[in-house]
Structures are given as structure tokens and as C-alpha cells.
Image (cartoon, rainbow, N blue to C red):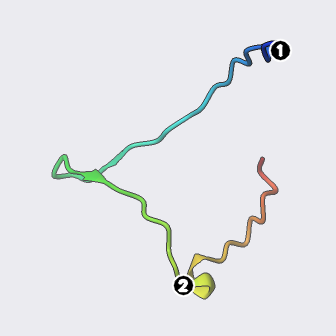
Amino acid sequence: MSEKPRVTRAGMGVMVRNPEGKILMGLRNTDAALADSDLHGEGI
């Protein structure tokens, strides 16, 4: 059995801090109407 070649991938993360120094967590919104975006992936 042959091994699959390794693929190097990169990612990016963003941490947002408020003026009090607390890290704001971004959670996925379960309400589709509120989670809708006008971007629709154009910036990718």
C-alpha cells in the first residue's frame, strides 16, 4: 500500500479584544436570517 503525499496547509485566526482586555469569542449564529451576509464569498 502506498502512502499519500503530505500536504502543507496554512490557516489564519483573528482574536478581537475589547477595551477591558477581554477576548471576544465569535460564535456561529444558529438563526439563518441573522447569520446571512451580503458578501456571499466575494472577498475570497
Q: Quadrant of residue 4?
A: top right
Quadrant placement of the N terminus: top right
Say if 23 sits above or below 3 in the image. Answer: below
| The disc label shown at residue 1, or none | 1
Identify which residue, 13 or 18, lies in the foreground: 13
Observer-side mark, 2 or 1, equals: 1
| The disc label shown at residue 44, or none | none
Counting other residues with Cα less than 10 Å from the Cα at mark 2, is it few (<14), some (14-19), or many (20 or more)? few
Quick one: label 2 or label 1, which is nearer the N terminus?
Answer: 1
Residue 17 % position (x, y)? 29, 48
In the figure, is residue 40 to the left or right of 9? right
Residue 39 % position (x, y)? 74, 65
Give the Cα distance between marks 2 and 1.
46 Å
Three-letter amino acid code of the residue under disc 1: Met
Q: Quadrant of residue 35?
A: bottom right
Secondary structure at numbered mark 2: loop
Identified at 61% across, 83% down, the residue is 32
Counting other residues with Cα less than 10 Å from the Cα at mark 1, is it few (<14), some (14-19), or many (20 or more)? few
Secondary structure at numbered mark 1: loop
Three-letter amino acid code of the residue under disc 2: Asp
Residue 24 % position (x, y)? 31, 55
In the figure, is residue 25 to the left or right of 3? left
Residue position for label 2: 31
